[in-house]
Amino acid sequence: MIVVVTSQFPFGAGESFIEAELPLWTAADDVVLLPEQRAGGPSARPFPPTVRLDETLADRWASRRWLAWAALLALISPVLWRELAALARARRLNPTRATVAFRTLAQAQLIERTLHDLARREGRHVDVVYGYWLSAGVLAGALGVRRGRVGAALCRAHGTDLWETSRLAQYTPLVRQFAPQITSVHAVSASGAEHLARYGFTDDQRGVARLGVTIPDEQTPPSGPGELHVLTLSSMTPFKRLDKAAAALARLHELRPDLRLTWTHIGTGPLHDEVAHLAEGLRAEGVVVELPGALPHDEVLARLRGPGVDVVLNTSDSEGIPVSLMEGMAHGIPAVAPDVGGIAELVPSATLLPAHVSGEEVGEYLAAHVDDLKAPRWRAEARERAATLVDAQRNHGEFIAHVRVVASAARARRRPGGTFSG
């Protein structure tokens, strides 16, 4: 049994990249989806019949009784006090980091108990806990490994879950303590895999497992003469720096008033009101702005197919390798983005901007390259790089093969009494 701990998938509209991986599992793998929350309501998105959904954790996540139980367990755990002592020795202990450590451990305790109850209820063993993020899910798996109740724990690592400087209080909780019990961590970029060393992961534990997207048969055409359609796709959070995107559009409109300029942003989040205010300012200047909110993955793909998307723009301060850029490039749409995280591993040098580029500089770049963004050469190169680096069938297939090897090794270590050795 392989349990995949997600933040919310298959509920809500997030984590859409999981959908590309799920069809490659078979019923013989016995994969169970274990979402932490039911974001967006009780209705689940469709998923293949080869995987199962268990909602026990989502029920408990919404239960005050279960949360109180997990909080008490975390408070008396030696793990918490070792973490606080390590922070104190490093002169990094403060109320925010102490709270993050406590909350993360409580979440891990709740997930680990749910894993144990799931296995006991089904009369099965959890051979692998697969966390889709470097967060509480894989820490719960590592806790289960310590207790002999889980065979192995592994995870992916993306952006803000990986880069410590991007985390709340620049702190990644508990990972250093649990690193020895985590079989492998797979960053979505080579630079991310290097960063994992700071948490104590060895060369043998660190790997690269790029995400993937489906490469469509057709390439999206550019917009017509005298037009430019800019698409951004992200949550509305501080690290995404949508204020820079708005500043870029304002500068572009100032430099190229002859263009019929359209900005579409797909996504929502805590900064929605701020982005909406920026959008109103752009509309007042004559820019067409569309804010459709968070959309299901199939609707996002429909937008990428056209009509006439000219560039997928990213202005983040911190990233792994954004799926939005992968999807856009797979459709033959050039991606313009800063050199942060693993973006340089995907985006061609011609459209790669400096890490700390200003919004105005982004606008000046776009104004100077309107024709290039529409040109067949740039658009063909974007599609070719996506097909080479982020083809879902190949990338997810290789990762799933690795998980199967780990699961087989875990089964081989299972003792007759039901616990795991080693």
Image (tube, rainbow, N blue to C red):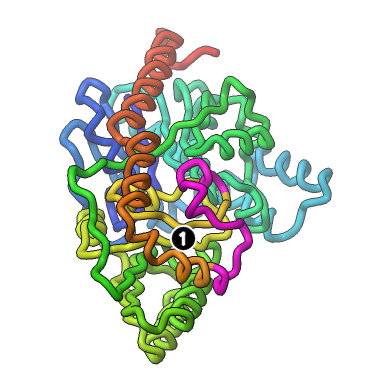
Work out which residue is located at the far bottom of the displayed protein and give it: 284
The magenta stretch is 341-361
Examine the image and state in which quarter residue 85 appears: top right
Q: Name the residue at 56% across, 27% down.
A: 206
- The spot of residue 130 in percent (x, y) is 41, 32
Three-letter amino acid code of the residue under disc 1:
Asn
Q: Name the residue at 47% across, 15% down.
A: 420
Residue 133 or residue 59, whichever sits in front? 133
- The spot of residue 353 in percent (x, y) is 55, 57
* 55 in the magenta segment: no
* Left/right of residue 34 with respect to residue 48 in the rendered view: right
- The spot of residue 296 in percent (x, y) is 24, 58
Label 1 Cα neighbours within 10 Å, binned few <14 / some 14-19 / many ≥20 = many
Q: Which residue is mark 1?
A: 314
Q: Name the residue at 20% across, 64% down.
A: 307
- The spot of residue 349 in percent (x, y) is 51, 48
Work out which residue is located at the far left of the displayed protein and give it: 49
Q: Name the residue at 50% across, 29% down.
A: 144
Q: Quadrant of the C terminus?
A: top right
